[in-house]
Amino acid sequence: MESKRQQKYGRQIQKDLSDIFQKECKEIFGQGMVTITDVKISPDLSAARCYLSFLLVDNPQRIMDELEFKNKMIRNALANRIRKQVRIIPSLSFFLDDTAAYAAKIEALFEGLVIPPAPLTDSEDED
């Protein structure tokens, strides 16, 4: 369970990272779109786990590799934005958020289920 401080800090990092991705890292994503679905902060506020979702992207793993390569530049841009608000600039870890794909898979499984009708009971036979 995250504390209020961790949640607030995570929302701020999420907002600032989305702004950085839109303005300073356009070349990484090309024509695709990125969404920062969640940011989890460690209790000591020194590490941030950022979960990303992509639209209109052919190879999300290539983008994830590019983000890891430019991690230092992204962290520096984040530091320039939140430097006066925090003591520690968190280390960033990027993860592919596959929640939408997982939900689609589960939905497909549910649609593929064949549920036979319930057998009639004696009281239903009399009606």
Image (tube, rainbow, N blue to C red):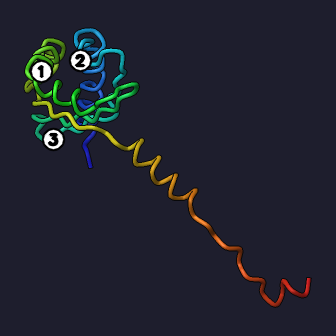
Residue 101: x, y in percent? 40, 43
Ranked by sequence position, the earlier of labels 1 and 3 is: 3
Q: Quadrant of the C terminus?
A: bottom right
Disc 1/disc 2 C-alpha distance (Å): 9 Å
Disc 1/disc 3 C-alpha distance (Å): 22 Å
Rate crowding at label 3 as few (under 14), some (14 to 19) or many (20 or more) other CA atoms within 10 Å.
some
Residue 90: x, y in percent? 11, 29
Residue 109: x, y in percent? 50, 58
Q: Nearer the viewer, residue 49 or 13?
A: 49
Query: Dot 3 lies on which element?
Result: loop
Query: Which circle, 1 or 3, is nearer the viewer?
Result: 1
| Residue found at the very far right of the displayed protein | 127
Query: Dot 2 lies on which element?
Result: helix
Amino acid of disc 2: Ile
Residue 38: x, y in percent? 31, 35
Q: Is residue 96 rendered to the left or right of residue 81?
A: right
Circle 2 is placed at which residue position? 28
Where is 15 relative to 101, above or below?
above
> Mark 1 near mark 2, Cβ–Cβ under 8 Å?
yes
Amino acid of disc 1: Lys
Q: Nearer the viewer, residue 100 or 62?
A: 62
Amino acid of disc 3: Ser
| Residue found at the very far front of the displayed protein | 58
Circle 1 is placed at which residue position? 70
Q: Nearer the viewer, residue 77 or 69?
A: 69
Circle 3 is placed at which residue position? 42
